[in-house]
Amino acid sequence: MNVIRYGVAGCGSTSDALGFGGSTGAPAAVSATEKLTTNGSPLYCWQTTSSLNTARAELAGCGTITDALSFGGFTGATVAVANTEI
């Protein structure tokens, strides 16, 4: 990914993936969404595509890169959120 993060959610496959949210360090959560793209086999890179409405880490995700869901997570060290985003 373009920025080292932990607590990231994701979905997709090994060649068509999406990663979103996460944290770059306690308690800062991030809202970036990044898509794994190919520049010609086997060269891959991460490209920032959009942002979550609420920056959060340790969230869950499911779906595909064109139809994904993110839900739950924390905006800080102990502040839980019940947001679901498409």
Image (cartoon, grey):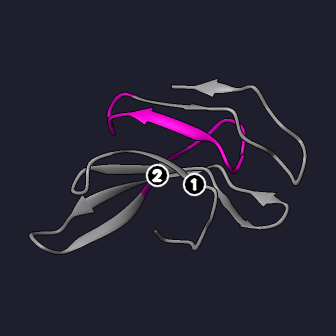
Residue under label 2: 19
37 shown above or below 65:
below
Residue 11, horizontal then vertical, whole percent: 39, 43
Magenta span of residues: 48-67
Amino acid under disc 2: Gly
Q: Is residue 76 magenta?
A: no
Asked whether the beta carbons under mark 2 and mark 1 sit within 8 Å of each other, the answer is yes
Q: Residue at x 86, y 51 (%)?
A: 76
* Left or right relative to 46: residue 37: left
Q: Position of residue 84 (x, y in %)?
A: 63, 24
Identify the residue at horizontal 70%, vertical 26% (top origin): 83
Work out which residue is located at the far left of the displayed protein and give it: 41
Element on which disc 2 rests: strand
- The residue located at (83%, 66%) in the rendering is 26
Residue type (three-letter) at the residue carrying disc 1: Val
Where on the picture, by quarter, is residue 60? Answer: top right
Residue at the spot of label 1: 8
